Image (cartoon, helix red, strand yellow):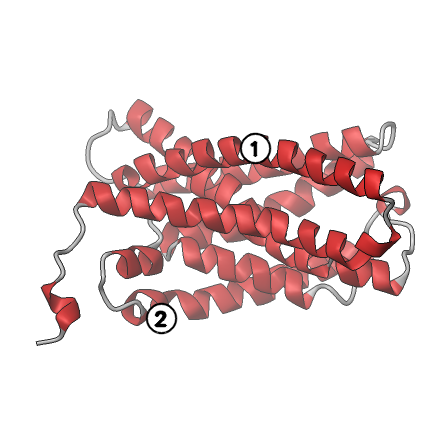
Amino acid sequence: MNSDDKRPTPTPRAMQWRLGAILWLLGMACMFAPILWALLLRWTSFQEALFVLLVSNLLYAGLAYAVLLALAVAVGVALAPRVGLAAPALSAWIGRRPVWPALRPQLTPGLCGGLAGAAWLWVLARNTPEVLRPPPSAPEHAAAFIPAKLLVGITDELFMRWTVMTLLLWLVWRLLQRGQGAPGRGLLSTAVVLSALCSAALTCLSTVQDMPGVLTPPVLAFLLLGNTVFGLVMGALYARYGFEAAILAHTLALALSQSFL
């Protein structure tokens, strides 16, 4: 008998804690690895005092982000099982079950979603309002932030799907079904739409902060439509196939679109 077979299967509560820890570590790595990489690429050009200030600010921001991420992950970990949402591959790995049977059904939908997402980003790039087009940057500067652009797909999914969409589905399930039975398709669709709209609204708020005065009605319509459609694809993948499918699709879409974004 394989020695691994003798190890007890983790309890559901232990699996929840482990899943939360893994997602938290993943979110922290995706947020700060690109920043640290960019700092390492330029550390010789910083004065010592400036470098110390940047690192101290990074540590301060990192503490706040770590707390926020922990709360966000905990919401998904606590509520996802109640409404039938899951990260099947990660859960299988934590539960010492074969990962491939849980991951395989998500690959094709995730790949198709990534291609659809990249095609939609291409359409948006061809029609982006002039005020939203970023200024050209040096090739080496752009290359330094490519990892950040790719990993942002994972952090987006952690917050907008794992946390916000799960919470919204739980709320409408408790309100309309009184927490009885599995959420119906109508509730799933509602949560997908609402989470996509939340993601689009947050993008608009971020644009207002970064670029005051540019949010005219045409620009607002462009941002809402573009981000809502993209969020609908990712939310549908999460609802029907699993969290890993949404991560795969989002990351692939960003990777394929790097040449024209």
Could you tell me if residue 161 is visible in this image?
Answer: yes
Separation of marks 2 and 1 at Cα, in angstroms: 36 Å
Asked if the residues shown at circle 2 and circle 1 are in contact, with their CB atoms under 8 angstroms apart, the answer is: no
The quadrant where residue 71 appears: top left
Camera-near label (2 vs 1) is 1
Quadrant location, the N terminus = bottom left
Residue 104 has which mark?
A: 2
Q: What element carries label 1?
A: helix
| Nearest the eye: 190 or 87 | 87
Which residue is the extreme one toward the front? 48
What residue is at 89 percent from the left and 42 percent from the top? 131
Q: Mark 1 points at which residue?
A: 63
Residue 46 has which mark?
A: none
Crowd tier of the residue under label 1, counting other residues whose Cα lies within 10 Å: few below 14, some 14–19, many 20 or above: few
Upstream in the sequence, badge 2 or badge 1?
Answer: 1
Query: Label 2 amino acid?
Result: Arg
Q: Is residue 168 above or below residue 258?
A: above
Task: State the image coordinates of residue 200 (x, y, percent, origin top left).
Answer: 64, 38
Task: State the image coordinates of residue 40 (x, y, percent, origin top left).
Answer: 74, 56
Task: State the image coordinates of residue 103 (x, y, percent, origin top left).
Answer: 35, 66
| Nearest the eye: 22 or 254 | 22
Query: Label 1 amino acid?
Result: Leu
| Nearest the eye: 49 or 75 | 49
| Nearest the eye: 184 or 136 | 136
**Number of numbered discs overlaid on the protein picture:** 2
What residue is at 74 percent from the left and 37 percent from the top? 221
Could you tell me if residue 230 is visible in this image?
Answer: no
The quadrant where residue 199 appears: top right
What residue is at 56 percent from the left and 45 percent from the top? 156
